[in-house]
Amino acid sequence: MGEDIVADAPVPSAPMTLEAALAELTRPGAEFEMVVTSVSGRPTRVFQFLEGKSLRDYYEGYGRLGAGRTWLVWNDQRWTFAQGLELTAQVAASLLDLGVRKGDRVAIASRNCPEWIWAFQGATSIGAIAVGLNSWGQRDELEQALGNSTPRVLFCDEPRFERLAGSVAAVEHVFVIRPGRPLPAGVRAFDEFISGAAGRPMPDVTVSSDDDALILYTSGSTGHAKGAISSHRNILSALHEWKLETYTRFAQKPWAPGPHTPEQPAVLLTVPLFHVSGLLSQYLESLIWGEKVVMMPRWDAAEALRLIARERITRASGGPPTMDWDLMQHATIGETDVSSVAEVGGGGAARPVENVARIQRTFPNAVPVEAWGMTETSAIGSSAVGEEYVKRPTSCGRPAWILDVRIVDENENELPVGQAGEIQVRGASVIRGYWNDPQATADAITDGWVRSGDVGYLDSEGFLYISGRIKDMVIRGGENIHCAEVEAVLYAHPAVLEATVFGVPDERLGEALAAVIVPRRGYEPGDEEVKRFVGERLAAFKVPEHVWFRLDPLPRLASEKIAKRQVRSEVIALLSATP
């Protein structure tokens, strides 16, 4: 298994146009040949050579190519590709010994660590569904995801285990990663769990392309997180779309890292693995290029710069623009050797235009990259690289070749070039729906088209631009925050009579969260008290940075809804006037 998933398209001997490169790479019989087949009962354009393949084939095929090379670096520990496959097999065999079978859920609640990867690969290799829980979430958020996914197995680090306290009783098997103290009865350490399977081969389990593989939780357009369910085909389609895009661009101009880099390329994994960008675009994509994955347990700009120099990182960031900003702002940036960096990626939020040129000055050998996608599209949607991005710094690039992208009005009518409306996406990487939530699925996906909630337009050259959002959503440093969720928590505070939450511009984060509150008569809450109240109930990134109190009622629209835009404009004016 796995051997035929790693075929490589020939590198063109002379520069080609984009159209010629795409035609050559996708022609019948070529690696990226596309055909139409039935997926979930709907005709879908797919990559022919991925038919019947699973993530197991992907790990094994690419892992064998670089068996003796370094796969993963974490602190001072290193693992080769061969060792990674052995640990994957140990987890897979140990899960089967527990009675875990295809379709069972295996949840992971942890900061980034090697065990996260081995657990994910082991579970998906036997057809179980990996559930990436938001490790930043508070107890209520983690409990809600556990209750929705009902996993048979939970792998968690010690802080998440303590946070969940007695909430894990409903999970049949719980294993703690690197525990620092004795564990209660019935709970075992991760290393102890897999030790009995040392040396055992990967179990012989058939996993198909359209089997479910992954659940990631996303706030979407509702107050409660929904479990986006991805198949093996969804994920593999996204990964090989990136490979196709790289080859088409290399055919035009030889800049790309990956297979064309003389030394082993390396990616700095900075985004949490429970994020689609961390899991797919940083970690899983790395297998295609045989990259060394240098994992950070948490974001720290000084440590990131140290690792870039020590490990000769070629692919940096790939997370929200906040990370680019932190790197370029750090005091030691001029003293650090960043000459190895060939690509500085970005996504999750719009990058300030002035930062595009600054990336080129700071990382002289790198091309800037901007991308747009969603959890629901397996991270792909559109991308812009190098010169095409520099020329259009407000664009998020060309739509992915394997996807269909359209712009529609409020009545679902497709709009012409240049006219803004909701961006909708359809194709092989789009999820089939949300786990145990048919209503949310019906609300988000119609005839295969997933509603993004983003407002944008396509220009005459086919480049996508995002101009706003339909959803009442704030993107703070790449993290989606649904305002209604935070407002619901604020209304639970006994001092709050009225509240509205929205985003305000922030140079580092893109947007910061702001709240305006009308207190009940007789109450005088302070902003720190309000922040503490929210922080005890929601993840830290959902706590408002700015809190204002007013005695007058909040202004209302004719519909009696709070006039949020008016309040937001007033607050932005107030912030602008503050020295």
Image (spheres, rainbow, N blue to C red):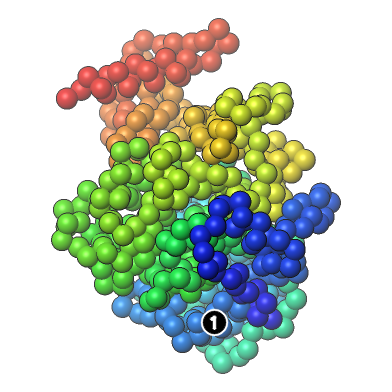
Q: In the image, what residue occupies the spot 27% across and 64% down?
A: 339
- Please tell me whether residue 550 is drawn above or below residue 515 in the rendered image: above
Callout 1 environment at 10 Å: few (<14), some (14 to 19), or many (20+)?
some
Is 505 left or right of 123, judged from the image as shown?
left
Residue, disc 1: 65
Residue 53 in percent (x, y) is at 71, 70
User: At 22% across and 48% down in the image, what residue appears?
Assistant: 329
Q: Secondary structure at mark 1?
A: helix
Q: Residue at x 41, y 40 (%)?
A: 391
What is the x, y in percent for residue 203? 68, 83
**Residue 235: x and y, percent?**
62, 60
Q: Can you see residue 431?
A: no
Q: Quadrant of the C terminus?
A: top left
| Residue at x-position 25% and y-position 50% | 361
Q: Quadrant of residue 210?
A: bottom right
Residue lying at the far bottom of the rendered structure: 199
Furthest residue toward front = 14
Left or right of residue 401: residue 36: right
| Left or right placement of residue 28 versus residue 14 in this view | right
**As displayed, is residue 171 above or below residue 77?**
above
Q: Is residue 59 visible?
A: yes
Count of residue discs? 1
User: Which quadrant does the N terminus fall into?
Assistant: bottom right
Q: Is residue 218 above or below residue 205?
A: above
Where's residue 232, x and y in %?
67, 63
Q: Amino acid at mark 1?
A: Leu
